[in-house]
Image (cartoon, grey):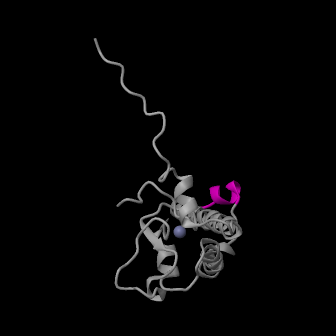
Amino acid sequence: MIFERYDCIYCGMTAESRDHVVAHSYESNSVSKDWSHDKIVPSCKECNCLLSDLFLPSIAERADYITGILKVRYRKLLSSPDWSQKELAALGKRLRDYVKGEQNKKRTVQMRISYAELMANNTCLTPQAYWESMGRFQPILNQETKAPTI
Ligand SMILES: [Zn+2]
């Protein structure tokens, strides 16, 4: 998978898929899918699935949608209370491990939402600009020629 080393452009998690910034079903020529780098971005499976065929033509609009939906989807987890170390220590091991696991999930969701909010404010970002920033389109400069070995 080519996106393994990238982060989801919407939430910052590891990207396992690619998101087509203009959903296929809205393109006039939907027969030939255009996977060129000026239209696709790395995305985690959840964000990709949430966006599915929505017509949101920019990264910022898509990130804004993700922000809202993550808040709703994880509202229970987000509203769960934070536990102090003292409170956690008072629990039995199994319950403590469970609570710690939930707290970690909560922090991950909070980080994803913060990331998505940042991307939602990044209104100038296009897929092409993203790839340029990743060096995908940069010409290979200063490629040193190897000194001949004697
Ligand atoms: Zn994501």
**Left or right of residue 35: residue 82:** right
Quarter of the rendering containing residue 16: bottom left
Q: Locate residue 56, reporting x and y percent.
A: 58, 82
| Count of marks placed on residues | 0
Asked if the magenta segment contains residue 34, the reply would be no
Given residues 86 and 127, the one toward you in this image is: 127
Q: Residue at x 63, y 82 (%)?
A: 72
Q: Is residue 113 visible?
A: yes
**Residue 92 is at least partly visible in this image:** no
Q: Residue at x 52, y 80 (%)?
A: 51
**Residue 90 lies in the magenta stretch:** yes
In the picture, which quadrant includes the C terminus?
Answer: top left
Which segment is the magenta one? 84-92
Q: Position of residue 74 (x, y in %)?
A: 60, 77
Q: Farthest top residue?
A: 150
Using residue 117 as the reference point, say whether residue 39 is left or right of it. left
Query: Which corner quadrant of the image does residue 130 belong to?
Result: bottom right
- In terms of image quadrants, where is residue 115? bottom right
Foreground residue, 97 or 89? Answer: 97
115 lies above or below 64: above
* Residue 69 in the figure: left or right of residue 19: right
Q: Residue at x 52, y 62 (%)?
A: 13
- Percent across and percent down for residue 132 are 54, 55
Nearest the viewer among 89 and 17 is: 17
Image quadrant in which the N terminus is located: bottom left
Residue 75 percent location from the top left of the image:
65, 79
Q: Residue furthest left?
A: 150
